[in-house]
Image: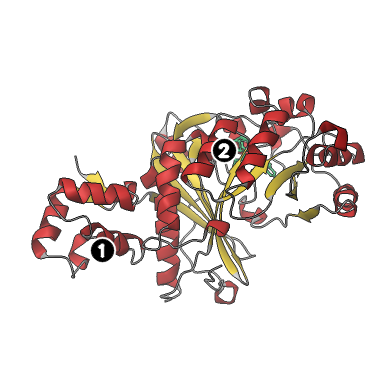
């Protein structure tokens, strides 16, 4: 069987080149062709010896995911739906801003955590994505947009692992993907601009700190165990006290000196001032507890509704008062702007639109396939580095 080279980070590609009887440094050239120049075939790689190109051609491929559809939002956000086989699809969202281009990447088809407010969670778990499937999302979007806008420089400056799935429950495929994103020979994304978002897989937070210490966002959503057990079922396994310890340890290796906590505002569920006060107490326990304050930024996410959830978003006034209480206490607090909601690309709306996972033809026929049209050029981000 042919080996898909999108599966390898640079270290693995070097080992692979060695196994073919080639020098390890050839891997760097090959890696740059694939990730920096978006090469799809070995013919293009003119600075590699013809014999090596032939060898590669008979052993490997560069095979990205197949696009099922693309939707352009009026705010410049673009969402792609990719086929991952077996009746599953995953979504990837590009969010342009004036000083950056952010890609929201999926790590699993579905998700096993089952948070009650999340559309992916409602869909259930199908399978882990491979490294090739994770990195393929970045490879495809970066090179497609570069070609569309005739740009040589980087389009995607930030990556957030906030698409479908729980990245820390797909650890072995996640780490080589992060390494490829970070590599100067790959996408050169800075550690501060690469964020892993997790619902709180405590042991893996610690391992992430050792293997690829990137920016960490923790999906909090509730300030006490009783409520968090209901909203984020993983809390029953890893309660808030353990999550707090993991966050504290992570700070020692994190590229930023705070952890971001995400908090989805659900009307009448987790949005009272008492809840805001509880967050404060969790972040800054009283002196007699002997716990240190946890340096944190809180990101309030207005809940993006979907019918099966039976939940509503908190009214804007409630969100404002909630934020104000935290701000008054000196906690940096932001309210996330919703992007791409006209194309269901906002947080928690990513469900891959899989209607019947057992029947590909049913799902395919129900996909709304949008023709590939370029987005408004003026919305293009500047490919900044940190
Ligand atoms: N599984 C990871 C990453 C993917 S979810 C995690 O849970 O962190 C990315 C973010 O979107 C999380 O903070 C998640 O809680 C939030 N989210 C999920 N569903 C949402 C919804 N319906 N409205 C708003 N935010 C949502
Ligand atoms: Fe999974 Fe994250 Fe959705 Fe929870 S919020 S179900 S962990 S994708």
The x, y position of residue 48, in whole percent, is 17, 65
Q: Specify the quadrant of the image occupied by residue 74.
A: bottom right
Do the numbered discs 1 and 2 sit on residues whose CB atoms are within 8 Å?
Answer: no
Q: In which quarter of the image is the N terminus?
A: top left
In the depicted structure, whether residue 150 falls above or below residue 317: below
Q: List the residue tagged with mark 1.
A: 29
Left-right relation of 175 to 303: left
Label 1 and label 2: CA atoms lie apart by 33 Å
Q: List the residue tagged with mark 2.
A: 205
Considering depth in this image, is 350 or 52 the residue closer to the camera?
52
Q: Residue at x 46, y 44 (%)?
A: 211
In the depicted structure, whether residue 327 falls above or below residue 199: below
Q: Residue at x 69, y 27 (%)?
A: 239
Left-right relation of 100 to 81: right
Considering depth in this image, is 169 or 146 the residue closer to the camera?
169
Local secondary structure at mark 2: helix
Left-right relation of 104 to 256: left
Considering depth in this image, is 124 or 326 the residue closer to the camera?
326
Q: Residue at x 29, y 64 (%)?
A: 33
């Amino acid at each position: 069987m042919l080996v898909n080279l999108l599966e390898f980070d640079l270290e693995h590609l070097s080992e692979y080149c060695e196994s073919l009887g080639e020098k390890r440094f050839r891997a760097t050239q090959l890696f740059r062709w694939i990730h920096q120049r978006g090469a799809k075939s070995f013919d293009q790689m003119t600075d590699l010896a013809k014999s090596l190109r032939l060898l590669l051609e008979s052993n490997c491929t560069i095979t990205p995911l197949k696009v099922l559809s693309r939707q352009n939002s009026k705010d410049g956000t673009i969402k792609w739906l990719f086929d991952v086989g077996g009746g599953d699809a995953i979504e990837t969202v590009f969010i342009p801003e004036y000083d950056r281009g952010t890609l929201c990447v999926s790590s699993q088809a579905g998700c096993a955590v089952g948070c009650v407010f999340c559309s992916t969670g409602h869909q259930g778990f199908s399978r882990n994505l491979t490294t090739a499937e994770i990195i393929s999302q970045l490879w495809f979007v970066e090179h497609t947009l570069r070609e569309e806008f005739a740009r040589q420089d980087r389009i995607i400056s930030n990556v957030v692992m906030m698409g479908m799935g729980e990245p820390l429950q797909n650890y072995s495929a996640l780490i080589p993907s992060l390494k490829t994103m970070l590599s100067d020979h790959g996408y050169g994304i800075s550690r501060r601009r690469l964020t892993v978002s997790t619902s709180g897989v405590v042991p893996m937070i610690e391992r992430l700190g050792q293997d690829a210490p990137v920016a960490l966002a923790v999906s909090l959503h509730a300030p006490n165990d009783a409520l968090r057990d209901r909203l984020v079922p993983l809390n029953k396994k890893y309660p808030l006290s353990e999550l707090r310890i993991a966050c504290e340890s992570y700070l020692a290796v994190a590229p930023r000196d705070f952890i971001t906590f995400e908090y989805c505002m659900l009307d009448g569920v987790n949005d009272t001032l008492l809840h805001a006060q509880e967050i404060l107490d969790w972040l800054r326990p009283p002196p007699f507890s002997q716990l240190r304050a946890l340096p944190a930024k809180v990101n309030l996410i207005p809940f993006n509704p979907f019918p099966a959830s039976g939940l509503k978003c908190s009214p804007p006034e409630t969100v404002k008062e909630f934020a104000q209480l935290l701000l008054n206490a000196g906690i940096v607090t932001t309210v996330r702007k919703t992007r791409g909601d006209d194309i269901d690309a906002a947080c928690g709306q990513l469900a891959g639109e899989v209607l019947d996972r057992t029947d590909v033809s049913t799902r395919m026929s129900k996909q709304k396939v949008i023709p590939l049209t370029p987005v408004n050029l003026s919305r293009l981000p500047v490919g900044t580095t940190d």
